[in-house]
Amino acid sequence: MKDKDSLLQNAGINTRLTHVGNDPLDYHGFVNPPVVHASTVLFPNAKTMEKRSQKYTYGTRGTPTTDALCEAINELEGAAGTILVPSGLAAVTVPLLGFLASGDHALIVDSVYQPTRHFCDTMLTRLGVEVEYYDPAIGVGIEQLFKPNTKLVHLEAPGSNTFEMQDVPAIAAIAHKHGAIVALDNTWATPVYFRPLDFGVDISMHAATKYPSGHSDILMGTVSANAKHWEQLKEANGALGICGAPDDAYQILRGLRTMGIRLERHYESALDIAKWLAGREDVAKVLHPALPSFPSHELWKRDFKGASGIFSFVLAADSPEKFKPKAHAFLDALQIFGLGYSWGGFESLAVHVNLNDRRICKAPTEGPVIRLQIGLEDVADIKADIERGLAAANEV
Ligand SMILES: *Cc1c(COP(=O)(O)O)cnc(C)c1O
């Protein structure tokens, strides 16, 4: 096992995605780990039970199935430990609950996933945490926002729906200087394209619902910590009793095996379509961090190994009254794209983005923002579908 571990550490990403997480010889050679359904775990005698001196003690504390996935994520993220939770949103809320207390000040990026903002503005605020939003473009300027009680900085790079990049290492260094914890929602990039812990982040969270699942049918979140923060994260998870289910863990592990090659296709198709949209007159701008014209492109180029399949564009509209009718005309004309939330599955999806909750990075003024998840379909067919949408929007 040790030989395999060190071999995998130096191997390419697809080799690692293929082999991380479990050793088939532990299960009579079967390639995938068994799905262990468990609450009770039996002990051989009273002394072992009293000391809990065996690997598995109770279903909420992990099973061979959940461990296989946690080990895979640890290896991919370079983490000391990983917890599984039942959704991507819980992957954000559990560490915020685990590391913040009444009287603390938390800095949250303004381009954050909307339900994260909702949690911060309701439950976190009610529990006595002072929440302050900051500009994703702030960089080293974040130092001015630190207070003696600043305990945590939450990042999302790129941001939800508008895709602003952040200077992760610069923000992490300043946060650490002030004794604050650095958390980052890494759902967009996955550990294939960005490894937050290598850039100074302490806690990396994922909606495994997206690319790791890959098929729009599983909800799961993962939270990974470095050595300094792992014990407290594990304690928070145990105290809350929020754990991932074995069937879902099995499916996510299964999804990881093909995630690298799926992402290559999402990356290539989405960038091709983003470039094509950027050259059109009926498109005011394209929000994709891998486009050289995108304002924070240099940060993406410096720190990320690739881009996933989701980005937004702004439909050109000559007056604000036309934003919604144009967006609806575009969406209603689509035949291949589905209209639906979430992303990371095999199929293309489109949504008219609402940015009314933004305090600092306000919605673009040129027109409505449409978010596209580019699926695994053929690019020519996806473009033809987008052309149908644009033709309908142009009629408005
Ligand atoms: C989708 C998403 C989540 C939440 O994942 P769910 O499994 O749908 O709860 C969290 N963060 C980001 C950035 C997301 O895009």
Image (spheres, rainbow, N blue to C red):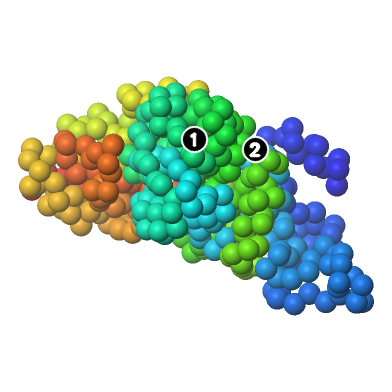
In the rendered image, the vertical position of residue 362 relative to residue 100, given as above or below? above
Tell me the residue at 48%/46% (across/down).
104
Q: Which residue is mark 1?
A: 148
Q: Quadrant of residue 85?
A: bottom right
Asked if residue 16 shows in the view, the reply is no
Q: Label 1 crowding class (10 Å Cα cut-off): few <14, some 14-19, many 20+?
A: few
**C-alpha distance separating marks 1 and 2:** 41 Å
Could you tell me residue 258's position as x and y percent? 59, 49
Q: Label 2 crowding class (10 Å Cα cut-off): few <14, some 14-19, many 20+?
A: some
Please state which of residues 216 and 152 is positioned toward the viewer in this rendering: 152
In the rendered image, the vertical position of residue 64 relative to residue 178, given as above or below? below
Tell me the residue at 85%/57% (across/down).
25
Tell me the residue at 27%/48% (across/down).
357
CB within 8 Å, label 1 to label 2: no
Horizontal placement of 357 versus 304: left or right?
left
Q: Amino acid at mark 2?
A: Ile
Could you tell me residue 333's position as x and y percent? 20, 54
Q: Which residue is mark 2?
A: 13
Of labels 1 and 2, the one closer to you: 1
Q: Could you tell me which secondary element the residue under label 1 belongs to? A: loop
Horizontal placement of 331 versus 295: left or right?
left
Asked if residue 7 shows in the view, the reply is yes
Q: Amino acid at mark 1?
A: Pro
Horizontal placement of 117 versus 278: left or right?
right
Tell me the residue at 72%/58% (across/down).
67
Q: Could you tell me which secondary element the residue under label 2 belongs to? A: helix
Residue 173 marker: none
Q: Quadrant of residue 317?
A: top left
